[in-house]
Amino acid sequence: MKHILNLFDLKQKVNYKNEILSGLTVALALVPEAIAFALIADLSPLTGLYAAFSIGLVTSILGGRPGMISGATGAIAVVYVGMIALLKANDPNISVDQITQYIFATVILAGILQITAGLLKLGKFIRLVPHSVMFGFVNGLAIVIFMAQMTSFQIKDVNGNYQWMATNDLLTMLGFVALTMFIIWGLPKITKAIPSSLVAIIVVSGIIIGFGIDTKTVVDTMDGESMAGGFPIPGIPNIPFTWDTFTTIFPYALIVAGVGLIESLLTLNLIDEITQTRGKGNKECVAQGTANIFSGFFLGMGGCAMIGQSLINISSGARARLSGIVAAIGLLVFIMFGAPIIEQLPMAALVGVMFMVSIGTFEWASLKVFGKMPITDVIVMIVVTLVTVFLHNLALAVLVGVIISALKFAWENAIRIRARKYIDENGSKHYEIFGPLFFGSVSVFNDKFDVQNDPDDVIIDFSESKVLDMSAIEALNQLTSRYQKAGKTIHLRHLSPDCQELLSNADKLIEVNVQEDPTYKVVSDSI
């Protein structure tokens, strides 16, 4: 019983009014995005809506970050485009229903992979993402959110091509978008009793519907389909359970799992910074996986954390799990009972909300660091932003940023290694090594030694250095071999025990000091 109470935050101090109103605001904002993401992959709007419901509900209950919202996302939908193209290439006669079944199976497999990542505690590796990558990530995402709203100002012609609205219609919509943004900006200066986003949606919708103003609505974005539906009935994906099927969907399941975890964990970190609290990354991995498995069995296209909706939720004052639960259940109620009403909501109100989310998401402080932070960090931030904006691949953007940052770090440490040399009263030559010894610094390390001209007794002291990888161990093996062939004795001091075990030349000519050795471990396959 205590565990159940903790799940729903009933043992914590919760502002129920804020949680419920924030959840309803998020539910309204989820509708057009879930539909749009489903249409990106040529799926039924209900596939996106059911995914938003099942993923939002499960992650709100089990997730590692109260207040974070998950649902169907564009980053996941884009992955399916490639898989659908492959399925159609393999079978030109494949039906939309059959493609949908393959997507359900892919989501379930991705969920299993995400749970595995959580159980292996791989969520901690999100710590390797530098702050410059985070800046680029949120800035790129803010631009993507902003640009994604542009289709709301366009209409399809008879050929299915998008064109801008007529001038009068465009100005009308822009006016109501501006009114929505003004309410969201101004209302909190008067009162924070009700989420400003919800008030803005209600006021703008009331004006447009009440006065019969002709402007674009949610139903206009649905290509003639309806969001009305019943409770999703669970079922097993109807696909051939063969090795060929597995090899077809596994690469895409792996991408879905990776993209979902990266976006979710980065969103978790962002919400942590905003709320000054600490989420649980590994728990979130398991929750995302569980949610995707549920989504696959309950007719959903899968998804992950949604930074836009999460920021709407947090900015509305929500801090507990209840808001996410309300949002998921509210969305299901809309699908089952409120579709005719929700379909008439003006897109101007929802676009205005997302514009404010975009403005709030952008890290404006990052613009002030130009000229103050290292040029490499600036480049990383710009590259991550550009990859996010132009490729719409958040996982690739983060990966590129991390690789550039890692190469920069490796280079800086590679040139940092140095040696202090002196000959003591006994005629022994000492090399005191400073800086890390790893694959990047091996070449500089080897250049420090003069094997032919050194005396017969050489001491290398690693008390101010660390041997970090197998490249470093191999460099030590080669160095000791060179001294051995020259008939000289070498003493290696302050090496960790595993370094000593890995040295293949530790015989009579080489004395390995075992006193005051460090306790760090060398990165190797044996540990």
Image: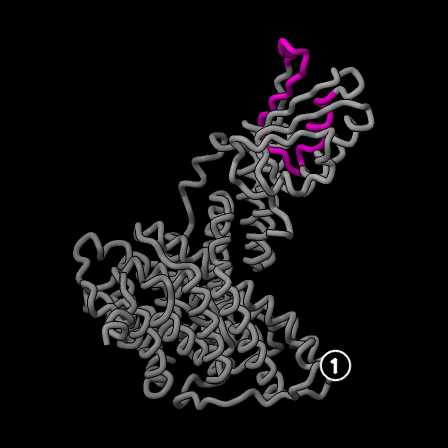
Viewer can see residue 172: no
| Residue 204 screen position, x and y as percent | 29, 68
| Residue 300 screen position, x and y as percent | 48, 80
Pointer 1 residue: 90
Residue at 46%, 83% (x, y): give it.
46
Q: Quadrant of residue 445?
A: top right
Residue at 56%, 49% (x, y): give it.
384
Viewer can see residue 253: yes
- Taking the magenta stretch, the answer to whether it contains residue 221 is no
**The magenta segment:** 422-449
| Residue 74 screen position, x and y as percent | 52, 67
- 228 or 439: which is nearer to us? 439
User: Where's the N terminus, which quadrant?
Assistant: bottom left
- 268 or 155: which is nearer to us? 268
Q: Quadrant of residue 322?
A: bottom left
Up the image or down, 358 lies above or below 170; here it is: above
SS for dot 1: helix
Up the image or down, 349 lies above or below 433; here it is: below
| Residue 347 screen position, x and y as percent | 39, 70
